[in-house]
Amino acid sequence: MKVVIAEKPSVARDLARVMGAKETNDGYISGNGYAFTYAFGHLVQLCTPQAYGFHNWSIANLPIIPTEFKLESKKLKRDGKQIDDAGALKQLNTIKYLLDKAEEVIVATDAGREGELIFRNIYYYLGATVPFKRLWISSQTDKAIKEGFANLKEGTEYDSLYMSARSRSESDWLIGINATQAITLAAGNRGLLSLGRVQTPTLAMICSRYLENKDFKPQTFYKIQAGFEKENIKFKATSEKIDKKELAEEAIAKITVGSEALVTKVEAKETKEQPPLLFDLTSLQQDANKKYGYSADQTLNIAQALYEKKVITYPRTGSRYIGEDVFEQIEELFQHLADTAEEGIATISRNLIGAKLNKRSVDEKKVTDHHALLVTDEKPGALVQEQRNIYNMIAKRMVESFSDVCLKDITTVVINAAGVELIAKGTVIKQYGWRLSADQVELPDEDKNTEDQDNENAQLPKLIANELLEILSLELSERFTKAKPIHTEASLLKAMETSGKEIDDDEMRQAMKDCGLGTPATRAATIETLFQRDYIKRDKKKLIPTDKGLTVYNLVKDRSIAKVTLTGKWEQKLEEMRANKVSYEVFMKHIKDYTERITKELLQLRISIAHEEIKPLQKGKIKCPKCAAGQIQLFDKVAQCDHYARGCDFKIWRTLNGVLLEEKEMKNLLEKGRTSTLKGIKTKEGNTIEGTLIFENFKVGVQ
């Protein structure tokens, strides 16, 4: 019997259907010589510090560096203690039962770093020795599944991918656990302060941009703008920045409306604007955030759902290219879009069939584990609106990427008005090419400063050097320099992709991807972790650090754990390990040495933290209802016990049943068991009432 291990039940069911297995059992599906079983994500994890004998948080225990990492079944935290996840244990027993009967194992977890780790952890934890092969597919269509089973890879081909995944997991454990315990203890147990290998430099980027924006002092400057008209075409020309008001006034005093200005230079340049590259996950998340306001995590979940519906290829890809083999099938996909897509996309798809396609996105050498995002030849059928939006974005990007270049004439005109140089620019599109399908309004780029676009004109008349133009209007305007905008998820993802370096060119950013923060598959989870830790909050699209987030940032901003470039180098080494260029032993020796150093650095903060209070948002004291010894601290979104490091994990949301509880009412709830009468309480039925919140058996109810 061949045992196939998928990452989740829905995938196992799909694989079983395609391969003719129909008998449903408890935890697996069998038939036709196969047994299809599954994980629920991570069934096996690295052991917690308790498994190595470290039951309490203590400075004397740090750093915790196991001689050899051990694996254990998935754990849940309850009442401050780690307990076995009963569902995970049951499924592991099912998998062990099947492995004991297997003649061969087929790995069908997601074809990427994390999927490989999920399988290997299960395999090694259960002590399995049966040989295994790898199913490596980029879409879930029946055709792709059948081809994948017909062309299974040797499991050993992915040993380096596993070692990269293992190193990532163990390094996150070492740095996360030691740094978190060190700074929490250094802060005197005033509540959990979480740090992490990727999480902390990401927080640092958000906080530094926020503070830079808030501390920015605008500089005043001045511009002279004159209006002209020729051949019934009105246009404007603008001076360079003038720093001093008196110089600006002196310059404009020389010019009068009705006088003539001399065209001194006309320069027309034809430019080719290449189409954008195909989407990888990160670029899809960026554009979905700009266009629809979707969070990175939301976009990933939508894309994953589309993948499981078989209508798009594997979403957790870091590549924006396809190989020649996939390119050979592109025309079939355009025919599919011509028959099934919305009218605009369908029309352009029809025009691309039989045409010479742009091959900018075709480069086998730049394809990593998976090629760029494409639609498949499955009909999308009924999709909810969010899924329809993401599907159309991917389809639209496909027709753009393989369309012709956009040809533009960019004209720059220099005009002399009484000694003041004015510049006018205009763009004429000669061939729309890929822009025929582009949005009429470009998606905003939050990182771009648009203050100097005054001399742009939608259209310019035909002008020649040495001709005279009448000045029809004249204006001196006061302007102010602008700060870099506060990060949105789109701009943060872009910064994570390039370790904070400002790179606009798509291909240059692709070249940087191996030394970015995290991977396309993990960046959304990193951002969500910062929300869960109450380090950041949303203000519309903006990412704003909380007081707690800023406090943590101020404590670690000068420490190496907050350095974006260091984390980027680690990510690069993990990719090199995947390519067999760096060994596990060398990388982990570096990480262990670093763990010792950063733990020592953070523990030394005890002296400075005395002056850097982590201030809860309250004046009085609230007794913890769980451990009694601790005090409840109020933060923006949550209230939690300050004895976290001593084993108390009590935490409660501050907004309960639609009502934000201030200090007095939180004290009433947790110490007296009930609030006073409150307005605006939302019931389970969705009604809004006036009533009392009650606290019994650590659950909140309405009375």
Image (cartoon, rainbow, N blue to C red):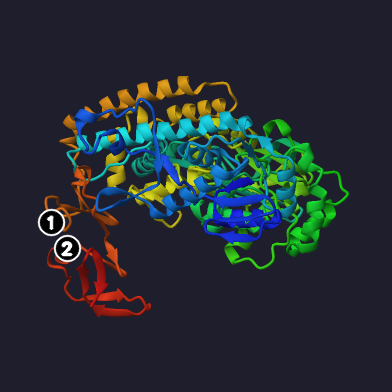
Pick the front one: 266 or 682: 682
- State the residue at coordinates (16%, 30%): 607
The image shows residue 72 at horizontal and vertical percentages of 39, 41
Q: Secondary structure at mark 2?
A: helix
Cα distance in 3D space between marks 1 and 2 = 8 Å
Q: Residues within 10 Å of mark 2 (few under 14, many from 20)?
A: many
Report whether residue 486 is seen: no
Circle on res. 670: 2
Circle on res. 325: none
Q: Quadrant of the C terminus?
A: bottom left
Q: Residues within 10 Å of mark 1 (few under 14, many from 20)?
A: some
Left or right side of 414 for 449: left
Report whether residue 22 is seen: yes
Left or right side of 582 for 280: right
Pick the front one: 64 or 133: 133
**To which quarter of the image does residue 138 belong?**
top right
Left or right side of 157 for 626: left
Residue, far right: 354
- Sequence-first disc among 1 and 2: 1
Q: Secondary structure at mark 1?
A: loop
Amino acid marked by disc 2: Leu
Pick the front one: 171 or 84: 84
Q: Are marks 1 and 2 in contact (CB under 8 Å)?
A: yes
The image shows residue 539 at horizontal and vertical percentages of 40, 56
Depicted 371 relative to depicted 562: above or below? below
Left or right side of 441 for 115: left
**To which quarter of the image does residue 391 belong?**
bottom right
Amino acid marked by disc 1: Lys
- State the residue at coordinates (49%, 43%): 523
**To which quarter of the image does residue 324 belong?**
top right
Circle on res. 623: 1
